[in-house]
Structures are given as structure tokens and as C-alpha cells.
């Protein structure tokens, strides 16, 4: 109500509307006019609260005081408008000081509560004030004997403060609920599943299983029906399975493979996907030095990474180029002719054995979705448990060391058994085992990848469950994690963890969780999980928990995942109407309050200590001893219709309306070339005129100028390239194509140096719009093919003085910081090349020019071949073939 006993107070929330009924002769009093205004105000409030909600509509940002000397006492509130939970509009027309120090001094109880364990929350509350007093004509009637009353009521606001335990604050509505539905199981008699892989492009679930009496098989189940599609012969024992999508190869690692000669070897078997129904034996065998190995294939480049577990004190990570593997398989796939790895990283400790996550097939080795990074966990390594984040390009170059790959943010000794990436590769989730006070515990934490390197930083409080971890999978929407664990009684459980809990920043200790409502119990020994790319189906492998008491068999459970659809936000409107959180919904000015009820939250000062009288500053500028002003964590927003429209349009442009992206599709065919405009038809020849008389001699014509400026047109031709056009690639120094293309790349040299800034702009933007390396790709079932860009290529400036022999560049180096460059180089980061494959270089010469503004000529080597226009600018094209001998 008003600060004086006049005016009215409109009911908050649902109430019976009552409006005036006018008729001729009705006697009207003050009450009738007040009720008329209150009716319209009440309906507007109800409309605001139920159809728009509570929170900030626009503005109302909290900022630091412009004067450093005032930042202990004040924060500044920017102009704006908000709706409180009763639907009242709180309008702040101009910048306002919030006198934090004075308000705390006026409320000793609040100041005492702010001991650092609580947040100081700043809010805004409606406060009606009477203004413009006028004489009261009838004193004593409605004015309680006063001679004046207020002519108007100003709908003002009042800042409020209160202290809140962080655990009681909510950062917004929780995510949708994921329900687990155990659809069916595939039973493996007298066998133990060792690894699972969901091969979605081929439509298979790959199951590597060992028989109890010796031998193994790779089962290929139809992912849609669950039927057995093919049964492939394995070695004495299998340890992992994977697939190379682009090459259409199925892989299985194991020990005791029958060699092409006598005896057996440890290694990886390869099967072409199109022959698995007719041929069950591997088409090639890549030998390894360890009987236990884990596999990972880059989803972008197809690079194969193999973690060989050499024992308790050693391990090795190797990478293999897909083109070399394909060439080797085409030649027969014999172990003795297997290609050498392109990258090797030695470890001075083990990564576990058959009894740990490594032997159970858990997700301890994961590629990021963009293929740039490989995450590794070393569970059960005798106190040396570590995590690694491997830059794959550095690994392939041979320059990576163990020390450089260590993820220092993960505490040493953390027993991580499962790793998974967020969809944007910005976060890495780790599932680890801990020895808690009340028994074994599972912890789930989130780490942010910092910058462009391999540094990690822990983000969020994390979550903890009772039990021993087995494996982890992350939903593609990053809303839920699926955790496989063994409880205190050794019973396998599959549960869902709400990742909002894991991401929550306060407090720092993990939140202890119970099993989810849809958690599934398995009377078997859970081993590993795999999730489909769309996140709709989960596969779980398990063996017998006790072979003496249980049937001698393994199983693969098929579990459908159903997340509440967005329609739940509509149907839950049937439950109740929103209302204020406090039972007291007055219309006055409360000031400081432990429960402000209908105040609008503006922001908070985390862990504020009133006794310290700290400096309050904007986020991002905080120094030691200062407190940041947080505007977003607990503030709710009420978007306008225009804002919602912009959000929806943005979502549609980015394709979010179709859900998480599926596997990358093949390159589309080029569009049809547009037809030239219709040529005008030449007119008919006129008839010969009659011979006329000879005219007088005319004056000599004026000499024409050469160019627009009277000077000859200048150009900057390409004088050398590192290949010979239309021929097999060869390097005069004898360096192999594989080493050249990945380490040195290919190069072009110009007659005059050009400005390197356009190249540096493209490098900083992480894109490539000036030069491309392309390959010929078949489209569809016919003979149609297109030139497709190889995505993992960067264009760099050259260092001065590249070595040129005739028209071929034979030696060059990059110089990313150059201001002028004699040419460019295209370096391939990750890709696979087939022997005899034709590659094409396309360079938009217009975009590079000398200091004088002379563009590079698109003509091939100064016009020696007709593949360019011959003048400044244009597009340069040339091609060559990959050597057939590697």
C-alpha cells in the first residue's frame, strides 16, 4: 500500500474480478472510482504474470560505480523495466544508485548473515508512493482528519537485499527427464562381450566377444531389427572393435591371430564392409606388440589411433594414415608389409589390464567430434592414474611428448574410467572412481578446453553416486549422462545423471545423488556402453556376475532412451498457475528482507562478506579481495515477442530445429552451370552502294594511350609450383609424398612478393577461402563425379628465398608472421589419399597483391598452359596425381 494510509491494493494472483455496473441515478463515491481503476490494473497484472511471467523485460543491468572510491558502498542500476510475480510493472526511468553499504548498516541481522557462505542478492520491489498533495474538501472522510490528500499515486520501486544459501538458488528450470526403457537383450551363450561399437553408417552394432572355451567372433547385428547380419572369425581373444567410415572398413583388435605364415600374432584385423556377408576372415592384419589394445578412429579424417597396453610400466599410442592402410589392404594386407605409423607417443606407465576399464571395453579413449583431439584415461595404473589430451596433428608430426599431453587440471591419481565430449568439443566429461567415507563412490566432473591448446579447466561442482564406475556416455544434447556402475552389493546399475547438476558452479563439492527413477538393475557384470549418434538408443554389454551361480553366458542389452519432449512445458500448465513464492503479497516497500517474496532478482554478489566491506566490480575485472557483480546466474528474463522471433529465426538458420547433427554426409554434386545469355542475331549484310567520288585526304589521327593511366598493364605471374602439372607428384629431394603433403604441404611462388595480411586474416578466422586442395569424388551410382574440397588444409605464407629449380619449388618453409611473402603453401593436417588419385589445386589469385596493388596472375606459370586468363587476377588451376609407390 502507500506510505500513507490512502489508495488501494490490488490482489495478487488469481482472484474474482469485480467491475462497476453503471446505471442512471447511481450514487458514485470514492470507492466506485477506485474500484474501477483497480479492476483494470488487476486484469493487467494477471495478464502480465500468467502470459508473460516474472523477470527482467529490458535493461536493469547492475554495473560497478564509475568512481573507484565508491565501489565499496554502491552499485549502479541501469534504466529498464521488469515484471514482478504479481504482474506489476517496475519501471526504472534513469540510472539509480543502490546504496548497499547503507542498507546493510540499517539491517545488522542481514549483515551478520553475510559471512561468506551466502550470496548477497539484489532485487527490486514495487513501491507505490502518494504525490502532489491537494486540499481535502471534506476532512475526516477518507483522509482521517487530514487537511490534504494525495492527488496522484506514483508507481515507484524500491531496491531490496537478502542473503541466500547458494543451494537454495535455482539457475532456471531443470532439463527434461530421460527415461530408460530396456527393450530386449541378445544372449551370447558361453561367451563374454569385450567391446561394442555402433556403426551407424553401415547399420551394424559390432559386438566383439570371447568364447569361454577359446576363440572369438565379431558379431554384426542389424541395428534396426537386432537380427544377426554377419559373423566374422576372430583370433584367440578380442579386446576392441571400431570402424573407418569413409573407407568402409570394420576393425577388431585382439591377440592370437593366425599369421599368413606359421604361428600367431597380436594385431588388428580389417574387413571391407561390402564383403562381410560373403567372407568371414579378415582381409588384412596389422601387427601390434601388445595383446591388449584400444582403438579410436577420427570421425573427420579417418586417422586410426591405437593405444597398445604393453604392461604395467609401458604403453604406446600410434596413429596410422587411412590412405596408407587402404593401399596396404589393396596389396593383400600381409602383416610383414603393414605400413608404419605416422605418429608415435611412448608412455612410462600402463593404462590398466584385463580387469580394469581397458579390458572391459569402457570409453577410456575418445576422439573429439572435429577429430582434432584425442582424450585418454589411464585407469588402474598403480597410483599413476592420469588423463591426457592429445593434439592429433602434433602426434602425427612426431613432435608430441608425454609431458606435453598431460591434462594437468585433472588431479594426479584420479581413477578415470570413462570419458566423453560435449557436442561442440568445448567440454570434456570424466567419470572416475573414488574411495569415499562411506565406501566406493562414482564422481562425474566437467572440464572446459581452454583456448586452442590442450589445457583443461574444471567447470562446475560435479556429481557423486555410491558405487564403482564402469562406463560413461553423454547425450548429444549435453543434458544427461548415462552412467554404468556397480553398487555397494556389486549389482550392476545403469542410471541417468542430470548434467545441470554437474555444471552448477556453487558450491565446489560434488552433489551427492541417488539413482534416477528409471535406473535399470542388471543381474550381470556390466562391462561397457555405446550410444547411437542421435542419442535415442543405448547398448550395454555384460557378462556373468558369478559363473558358478549364474548361467554361463553374456548379454547385450538394447535400451531405448526417451527424453521429455518440449510439449511437456505446455501440458504441465494443467497442474497449476504460477504464483509468488511468498505468502505475503503486500503492496508496500519492504527494504531489506530475508524473504523478499515478490521482488524481482536483479543479480547477486557471490559469497559476500559484509564485515570485509569488499569492492564490487563488473565481472571480468575482478582482482583479489573484490566481489564480481553477477547479472545472469539467477536473473530471469521476460523476452518480448520480437526477441523470441529473432531467437527462432536464428535457430532455424543454424538448423537446430532438426535436432543434433547426424553423421557427416557425402559431398553433394556441383550445381548445373548456368547457360550463357542469348546471343543477339547478327543483322543481314546491306547491299553494296554505288561507287562514290574520292574524298579529300583526312587529318592524321591522334596516337592512343596504352592504358587508362597511360602505362602498360602490369601483372605478377606464378613462376613455380612444387609439382609438375598433370603428372605424378615427385620431389627432387627424394622425400616421399606422405611426408611432403603432411609436413611441408605444396607450394606456389610468385614473381613479386605479396602482402600476407589476407592469409593471416583467414588463419585467425580458422577458415580457408583463398586456396584449396581438391579431390575427385563420385556422386550416386552413376559415373558422375565432382571436385570436393579437402577440409583439413591450411594456407600459410612462405618464408623468404624458397629454393626453385626451373619452374618447380623444391624447398620452402612457412612464416606465419610475415608481412610480405614470396608465395603460399597449402599444408594438409589430416586426410587420406589413395595411390594414383588425382588432386587439384585451385587458387583465387585476385585476393593477393603486391604493396603497389598488383594482383597475382591466375595464368599457369606465366601463361605456359591455358588454365588461367593470362592477366592479373583470375583463378589458377592445376592438378597432379598421388604416387602409386607411396
Image (spheres, rainbow, N blue to C red):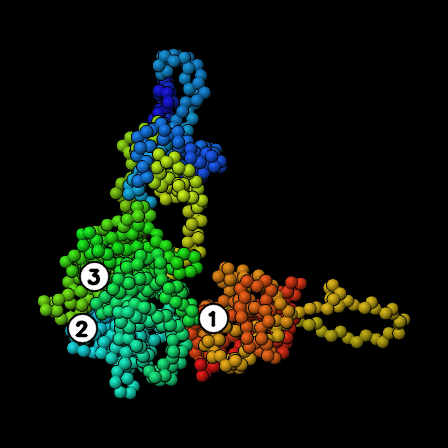
Q: Which numbered disc, 2 or 1, marks the residue that appears first in the sequence?
A: 2
Q: Quadrant of residue 133?
A: top left
Reading the image, the residue beneath label 2 is 191
Q: Which mark is residue 355?
A: none
Q: Quadrant of residue 122?
A: top left
Left or right of 269? Residue 102 is: right
Q: Residue at x 36, y 83 (%)?
A: 337
Total of numbered circles in the picture? 3
Nearer the observer: mark 2 or 3; the answer is 2
- Residue 198 appears at what percent x and percent y? 29, 68
Q: Which quarter shows the C terminus?
A: bottom left
- Residue 442 appears at what percent x and percent y? 24, 56
Q: Residue at x 61, y 66 (%)?
A: 754
Q: Nearer the viewer, residue 537 or 594?
A: 594
Reading the image, the residue beneath label 3 is 182
- Residue 295 appears at what percent x and percent y? 31, 71
Q: Nearer the viewer, residue 349 or 74?
A: 349
Nearer the observer: mark 3 or 1; the answer is 1
Q: Which numbered disc, 2 or 3, marks the residue that appears first in the sequence?
A: 3
Callout 2 secondary element:
strand
Q: Residue at x 39, y 29 (%)?
A: 102
Q: Nearer the viewer, residue 664 or 642?
A: 664
Q: Residue at x 17, y 61 (%)?
A: 522
Q: Quadrant of residue 293?
A: bottom left
Reading the image, the residue beneath label 1 is 828
Q: Can I make out residue 537 in this image?
A: no
Q: How far separated are the C-alphas under marks 2 and 3?
A: 21 Å
Callout 1 secondary element:
strand
Callout 3 secondary element:
strand
Q: How far separated are the C-alphas under marks 3 and 1?
A: 45 Å
State the residue lying farthest toward the left. 549
Q: Compared to 847, does 3 lie above or below?
A: above
Amino acid at each position: 500500500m502507500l506510505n500513507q494510509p490512502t489508495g488501494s491494493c490490488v490482489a495478487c494472483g488469481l482472484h474474482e474480478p469485480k467491475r462497476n455496473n453503471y446505471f442512471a441515478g447511481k450514487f458514485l463515491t470514492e470507492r466506485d472510482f477506485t474500484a474501477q481503476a483497480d479492476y483494470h490494473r488487476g486484469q493487467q497484472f494477471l495478464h502480465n504474470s500468467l502470459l508473460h511471467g516474472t523477470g527482467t523485460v529490458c535493461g536493469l543491468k547492475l554495473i560497478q560505480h564509475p568512481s573507484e572510491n565508491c565501489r565499496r558502498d554502491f552499485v549502479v542500476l541501469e534504466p529498464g523495466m521488469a515484471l514482478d510475480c504479481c504482474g506489476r510493472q517496475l519501471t526504472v526511468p534513469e540510472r539509480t544508485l543502490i546504496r548497499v553499504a547503507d542498507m546493510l548498516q540499517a539491517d545488522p541481522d542481514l549483515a551478520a548473515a553475510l559471512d561468506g557462505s551466502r550470496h548477497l542478492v539484489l532485487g527490486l520491489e514495487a513501491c507505490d508512493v502518494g504525490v502532489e498533495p491537494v486540499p481535502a474538501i471534506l476532512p475526516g472522510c477518507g483522509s482521517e482528519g487530514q487537511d490534504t490528500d494525495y492527488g496522484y499515486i506514483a508507481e515507484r520501486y524500491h531496491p531490496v537485499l537478502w542473503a541466500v544459501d547458494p543451494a537454495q538458488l535455482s539457475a532456471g528450470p531443470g532439463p527434461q527427464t530421460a527415461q530408460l526403457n530396456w527393450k530386449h537383450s541378445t544372449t551370447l551363450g558361453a561367451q563374454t562381450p569385450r567391446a561394442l561399437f555402433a556403426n551407424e553408417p553401415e547399420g551394424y552394432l559390432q559386438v566383439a566377444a570371447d568364447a569361454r572355451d577359446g576363440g572369438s567372433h565379431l558379431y554384426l547385428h542389424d541395428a534396426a531389427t537386432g537380427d544377426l547380419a554377419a559373423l566374422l572369425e576372430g583370433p584367440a581373444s578380442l579386446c576392441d572393435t571400431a570402424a573407418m567410415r569413409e573407407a568402409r572398413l570394420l576393425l577388431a583388435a585382439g591377440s592370437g591371430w593366425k599369421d599368413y605364415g606359421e604361428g600367431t600374432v597380436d594385431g588388428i584385423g580389417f574387413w571391407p564392409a561390402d564383403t562381410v556377408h560373403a567372407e568371414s576372415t579378415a582381409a588384412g592384419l596389422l601387427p601390434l606388440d601388445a595383446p591388449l589394445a584400444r582403438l579410436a578412429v577420427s570421425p573427420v579424417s579417418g586417422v586410426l589411433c591405437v593405444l597398445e597396453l604393453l604392461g604395467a610400466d609401458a604403453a604406446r599410442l600410434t596413429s596410422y594414415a587411412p590412405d596408407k592402410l587402404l593401399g596396404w589392404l589393396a596389396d593383400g594386407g600381409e602383416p610383414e608389409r603393414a605400413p608404419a605409423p605416422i605418429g608415435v607417443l611412448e608412455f612410462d606407465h600402463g593404462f590398466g589390464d584385463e580387469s580394469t576399464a581397458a579390458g572391459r571395453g569402457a570409453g577410456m579413449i575418445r576422439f573429439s567430434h572435429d577429430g582434432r583431439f584425442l582424450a585418454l584415461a589411464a585407469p588402474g595404473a598403480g597410483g599413476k592414474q592420469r588423463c591426457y589430451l592429445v593434439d592429433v596433428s602434433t602426434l602425427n608430426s612426431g613432435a608430441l611428448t608425454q609431458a606435453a599431453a598431460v591434462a594437468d587440471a585433472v588431479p594426479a591419481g584420479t581413477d578415470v574410467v570413462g570419458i566423453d565430449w560435449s557436442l561442440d568439443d568445448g567440454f570434456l566429461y570424466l567419470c572416475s572412481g573414488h574411495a569415499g567415507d562411506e565406501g566406493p563412490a562414482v564422481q562425474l566432473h566437467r572440464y572446459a578446453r581452454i583456448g586452442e591448446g590442450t589445457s583443461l579447466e574444471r567447470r562446475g561442482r560435479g556429481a557423486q553416486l555410491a558405487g564403482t564406475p564402469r562406463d560413461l556416455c553423454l547425450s548429444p544434447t549435453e543434458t544427461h549422462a548415462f552412467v554404468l556402475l556397480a553398487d555397494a552389493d556389486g549389482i550392476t546399475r545403469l542410471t541417468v545423471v542430470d548434467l545441470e547438476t554437474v555444471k552448477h558452479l556453487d558450491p565446489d563439492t560434488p552433489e551427492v545423488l541417488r539413482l534416477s527413477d528409471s535406473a535399470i538393475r542388471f543381474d550381470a557384470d556390466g562391462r561397457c556402453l555405446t550410444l547411437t549418434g542421435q542419442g535415442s538408443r543405448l547398448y550395454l554389454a555384460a557378462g556373468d556376475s558369478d559363473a558358478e551361480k549364474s548361467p554361463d553366458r553374456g548379454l547385450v542389452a538394447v535400451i531405448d532412451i526417451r527424453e521429455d519432449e518440449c510439449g511437456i512445458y505446455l501440458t504441465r500448465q494443467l497442474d497449476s498457475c504460477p504464483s509468488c513464492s511468498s505468502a505475503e503479497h503486500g503492496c508496500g516497500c519492504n527494504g531489506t528482507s530475508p524473504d523478499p517474496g515478490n521482488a524481482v532478482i536483479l543479480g547477486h554478489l557471490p559469497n559476500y562478506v559484509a564485515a570485509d566491506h569488499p569492492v564490487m566490480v563488473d565481472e571480468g575485472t575482478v582482482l583479489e579481495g573484490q566481489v564480481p557483480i553477477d547479472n545472469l546466474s539467477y536473473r530471469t528474463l521476460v523476452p518480448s515477442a520480437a526477441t523470441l522471433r529473432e531467437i527462432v529465426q536464428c535457430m532455424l538458420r543454424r538448423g537446430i530445429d532438426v535436432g543434433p547433427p547426424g553423421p557427416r554426409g557425402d559431398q553433394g554434386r556441383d550445381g548445373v552451370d548456368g547457360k550463357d545469355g542469348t546471343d543477339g542475331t547478327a543483322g543481314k549484310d546491306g547491299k553494296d552502294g554505288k561507287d562514290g567520288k574520292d574524298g579529300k585526304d583526312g587529318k592524321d589521327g591522334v596516337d592512343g594511350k596504352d592504358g587508362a593511366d597511360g602505362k602498360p598493364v602490369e601483372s605478377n605471374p606464378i613462376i613455380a609450383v612444387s609439382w609438375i602439372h598433370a603428372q605424378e607428384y615427385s620431389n627432387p629431394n627424394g622425400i616421399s609424398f606422405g611426408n611432403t603433403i603432411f609436413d611441408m604441404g605444396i607450394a606456389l611462388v610468385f614473381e613479386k612478393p605479396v602482402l600476407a595480411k589476407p592469409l593471416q586474416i583467414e588463419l585467425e578466422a580458422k577458415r580457408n577461402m583463398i586456396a584449396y586442395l581438391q579431390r575427385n569424388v563420385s556422386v550416386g551410382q552413376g559415373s558422375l563425379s565432382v571436385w570436393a574440397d579437402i577440409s583439413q588444409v591450411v594456407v600459410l605464407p612462405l618464408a623468404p628465398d624458397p629454393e626453385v629449380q626451373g619452374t618447380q619449388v623444391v624447398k620452402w618453409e612457412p612464416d606465419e608472421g610475415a608481412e610480405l611473402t614470396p608465395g603460399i603453401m597449402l599444408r594438409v593436417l589430416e586426410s587420406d589419399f589413395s595411390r594414383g588419385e588425382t588432386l587439384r589445386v585451385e587458387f583465387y589469385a585476385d585476393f593477393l597483391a603486391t604493396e603497389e596493388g598488383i594482383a597475382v596472375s591466375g595464368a599457369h606459370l606465366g601463361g605456359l598452359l591455358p588454365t588461367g586468363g593470362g592477366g592479373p587476377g583470375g583463378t589458377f588451376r592445376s592438378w597432379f596425381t598421388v604416387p602409386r609407390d607411396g
